[in-house]
Amino acid sequence: MAVTALLVSEQRLKQYTALDINVRTEEITPFIIAGQDIYIQDILGTKFYERLKAGVIAGNLNTDEELILNDYIAKPLMHYSLYLMLPTLKYKIVEKGLLSGTSEETAPTTLDELQYVRQSELDLAQFYAERLREFLSDNPGVYPQYDAPGVDGMQPNHDMPYFSGLVTSGIQRYRTYYEEKCQDCCPDCGPAPSTP
């Protein structure tokens, strides 16, 4: 059986997120693996990601790699993992089909509530992911596998992971430009509005 490196432990995920301590390890591990494969590999690129996994397995991470792993990678990975895990905490797939779990002491969660909690976890994960990107950007050359040329696997994604609004800067500038150019071209165009 192949050994798979976890970049954050199940215990740390329970300790630093809202995940209950009674959730079984075998329910957590697949989502840590998925979170690091989907989100962390996207940020680091395949070469650096594979180096960190190999270093965890071999126990030969250098000081800089331990720093980025513990202080910058673990935080987004924990929240991305919980984000991915949340639907399966509510819904279980068994041989008889899809079940929604409830107990005598708890009230069932609505889909809207589940979506709210997932969005909250995603927001946290994206915040920490942006801190990871900024750290890598502020420390060029410290991690040689990051941004290393090559086509084997994914290249690091430098884009901001989240967008929280509508950007309209520049629209007025272009509109004014065309209104000024079009003043006399048709009857619908009048003089360009004055800008403050």
Image (cartoon, rainbow, N blue to C red):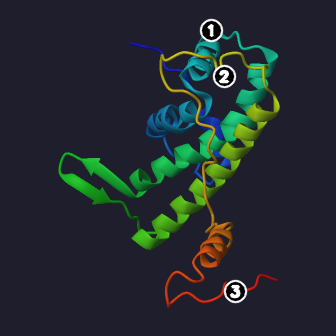
Q: Secondary structure at mark 2?
A: loop
Q: Residue at x 64, y 13 (%)?
A: 55
Q: Secondary structure at mark 1?
A: helix
Question: Image quadrant for the N terminus?
Answer: top left
Q: State the residue lying farthest toward the front.
A: 184
Q: Residue at x 76, y 40 (%)?
A: 134
* Mark identifier at residue 193: 3
* Mark identifier at residue 97: none
Give the residue type that dot 2 points to: Tyr
129 in relation to 73, above or below: below
- Residues at marks 1 and 3 touching, judged by CB atoms closer than 8 Å: no
Which quadrant of the figure has residue 103?
Answer: bottom left
Toward the viewer: 44 or 20? 44
Label 3 crowd bin: few (<14), some (14–19), many (20+), radius 10 Å:
few
151 in relation to 122, above or below: above
Residue 108 visible to the viewer: no
* Mark identifier at residue 146: 2
Q: Nearer the viewer, mark 3 or mark 2?
A: 3
Toward the viewer: 147 or 95? 147
Label 1 crowd bin: few (<14), some (14–19), many (20+), radius 10 Å:
few
Image coordinates for residue 94, horizontal then vertical, percent: 25, 47
Toward the viewer: 196 or 114? 196
Q: Earlier in the sequence, mark 1 or mark 3?
A: 1
Image coordinates for residue 118, horizontal then vertical, percent: 52, 59
97 in relation to 77, above or below: below
Q: Which residue position holds label 1?
A: 58
126 in relation to 140, above or below: below
